Amino acid sequence: MATRVRASARAPRGRSAPAGTPRAQPARGRAQPPGPTSSGPTTPGPTSSGPTTPGRTTSGAPAVPDASPPDPRFQRDPEFIRQVLPVLERALHWYAPEIRGLDRLPATDPFLIVGNHSGGPMMPDMWIFYAAWTRQHGIEREAYGLGFDLLFAAPGLSSVWRKFGTIPASMDNADAALDRGAPVLVYPGGDWEACRPFSHRHRIDFHGHTGFVKLALRRQIPVVPLVSHGSHESLVIVTRGERIASLLQLNRLRIKVFPIVLGVPFGLTTILGPYLPLPTQVTVEVLEPLDWTHYGPDAADDPEIVQRCYDEITGLMQAELDELAATHRFAVLRRFKNA
């Protein structure tokens, strides 16, 4: 079954960025494609009437090469993504993915995409959005995701994550990615939300993390809420295992959980498995972008405004998740029904 992609069809929730509102542009960065679905390069010169001589500018002066070394944090590899993407999409058929509202994404970079995290270490919701984004916008268009430290501590996996465009989660790294003119995907709930108990599967739980709000306010960029449903029914997490994580001193990797899972075929086990994720239908919905620019960049230092924005986005996302939970009940059964 192919991923079903649907355009948005209902009225937006909450306050969104009005059409035609100019977006803040980065002080520096790479040229971006001219439209949200274009994967081609921009025109090299805005008023050039003919080709330029290699090694020279349009005025005929010698071109000065960029002598700055490449930033080692950014190792996104388009050729690697091109080879792996078809394999990833075939694997995602297990979840009968449906993604809606991609047309709501801003046409101008950069911006933040803020999602709820589910499904434990498998993270099917993240991969489903990643694959759909890449297909719609092209492999060459830069986009980055923030990942927690454990992803980069696993032997041999750090380089793989970086090739996909994942960078360690920090304010400095997020700033650097936005400086490149790229959208940034962040899951503020991190492992705390991704490994919440099965009984909390329909809850948005960012654990009070407000860094993404401060970043958006300071940078004066749109924030796009991303809500997923169904991922957290692919496994049954009994408990987060905070005490186990503390005993194992996982806090050194900024990891607060070590979940106990009820899985197939061995029953009760740890998050390390082995277990087979249940086939569920995963739905990912892109909501209307939120525009907080009227607060101004200094609002990032105002706790009251930061909390107001945090409550706004989590409230909108919870309302959407409640609706998906009501209309897409029993995600495992829906998976077989739609097979």
Image (cartoon, grey):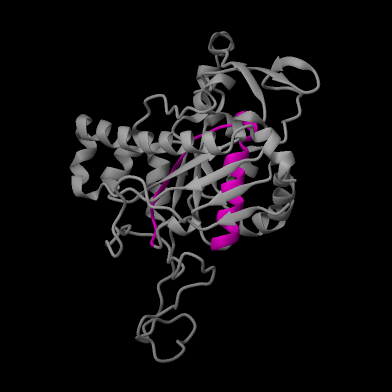
Q: Which residues are magenta?
A: 108-137
* Residue at image coords 21%, 35%: 305
Residue 82 falls in image quadrant: bottom right
The x and y percentages for residue 256 are: 51, 19
Query: Is 219 rendered above or below residue 21?
Result: above
Would residue 140 be visible to someone looking at this image? no
Q: Is residue 29 above or below residue 321?
A: below
* Quarter where residue 269 is shown: top right
Which residue is most to the bottom?
49
Extreme right residue here?
Answer: 265
22 displayed left or right of 119: left
Where is residue 274? Give x, y as percent: 76, 23
Report the front residue among 299 and 149. Answer: 299
In the picture provided, is 106 more to the left or to the right than 330?
Answer: left
Using the image, determine if residue 313 lies above or below residue 181.
above
Residue 126 colored in magenta in the image: yes
Is 218 covered by the magenta stretch?
no
Q: Nearer the viewer, residue 149 or 210?
A: 210
Query: Where is residue 196 shown, x and y percent of the image?
Result: 54, 22
